Amino acid sequence: MRTSRSCLLLAVATLMSHAQLARAQCPGGGFPPPDPICVPTATCTRYGNDPVPYDPADVAVMPSCFGGTLLGPVADRNGTPRYACLYQPASASTRPLPLVVYLHPSLATADSVWQVTNLTTFVNSANVTDDSGRPGFILLAPEGRKTCHYYPQPDQRQPGWDNWYRNFDPSDAAENVDAWAIDRFVAQQVASGRVDTNRIYVTGWSNGAAMGYLYGLTRPSIAAIAVYSAPDPFHAFNDPCPQVPVVSGSSTVDRLRITNLRVPTIHVHNDCDIVGLCPNGERLARQLLPLGIGVQDAIIDTASLPANGCVDACGTDPNASYDPCTNPGGSTIGVGNHVRWPDDWAPAILDFFRVHPLYARGR
């Protein structure tokens, strides 16, 4: 059961952390100390950065999955136990149902799917099949790991996803272990026979939205992507090894080939977002559209109403900037906007999935 208290605690904790960051980084404050485990990539490769560092003692995260089913543990190649939360309609369907994969934000866990979003409230009733006689969907929320991120403190080493090591090749033994883990849990549900394989979708929030984009763009089995407040997974903040997406040729140090051609996407994000993310999301859209990737750019204001564009006072840097001295809006109002899930847009996200089955792309 989702509670307003959970929302409030998440918002207050994040706001306090970023307020402390702002005071520390402006003149007279000094910078928060870096995490000694989080050493930046020294040499970029065709997969961008090295796999993110972590402390083996606290890398594993196990959610509670309140109201759902805890899946796992499944050990990844590093030996880290991986988990996921599963939510299904109360009444078993005699026909396969859509699968919606939710990837949680950093500084949060898979439990955010029931604590803070309203997605679980639609599992029994939403029409994602485009068949009113077959309501409901399966909701899968894999759990990330506590690893280093190329984000500012307090998010330098927290639960989340590695969207900086961009080896998403399932045939490669050195594949990104987070992508591997998501694949394992998706495959488990597909093998059960309960999933409509024409309707496998991915959504996510913040760091999970960036991972959702990257995962969905490299998995031809994903029918559509619909995320909230995503940093550009190819270049945001101080990423040492940025790349641009391409659809032809091979991946190089500067470019990453994506393989889910013509996948439709919707990006719901704030006109004033945390640390200036809005123009970063706009650049991502400009890069994807010429590649034939459909991007529905849904910018919203603080009231979750459609907005006309990014608010300059909240950041203008296309890489996004976490300098609170020159970007005060992104470090105050933007934080508040970012940490609230857009409840009013969840039906639109699910309806976007409904109208975009895999077979609609003519495969």
Image: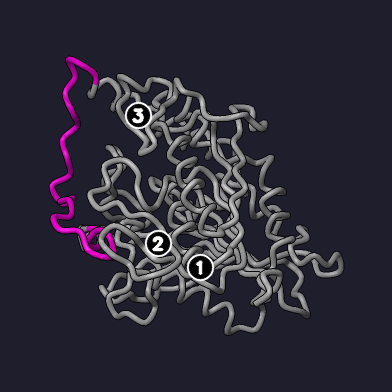
Give coordinates of residue 76: x percent, y percent. Answer: 33, 74
Relative to 219, is 130 on the left or the right?
right
> What residue does disc 1 label?
70
* Res 335 quadrant in image: top left
First-in-chain label (3 vs 2): 3
Would you say residue 293 sits in the magenta stretch?
no
Q: Note whether residue 31 is visible.
A: yes
- How dense is the environment of label 3, judged by Cα within 10 Å: few (below 14), some, or many (20 and up)? many
> What residue does disc 2 label?
62
Q: Secondary structure at mark 3?
A: helix
Which dot, 3 or 2, sits closer to the camera?
A: 3
Q: Residue sitting at 43 percent across and 39 percent down? A: 280
| Magenta-colored span | 26-52
Q: Secondary structure at mark 1?
A: strand
> What residue does disc 3 label?
18
Q: Residue sitting at 35 percent across and 52 percent down? A: 159
Q: Residue sitting at 74 percent across and 60 percent down? A: 355
What amino acid is labelled 2 in the image?
Answer: Met
Look at the image and tell me in which quarter the C terminus lies: bottom right
First-in-chain label (2 vs 1): 2
- Cα distance in 3D space between marks 3 and 2: 26 Å
- Cα distance in 3D space between marks 3 and 1: 32 Å
- State the mark number for residue 22: none
Q: Note whether residue 68 is visible.
A: no
On screen, residue 59 above or below 151: below
Relative to 145, is 70 on the left or the right?
right
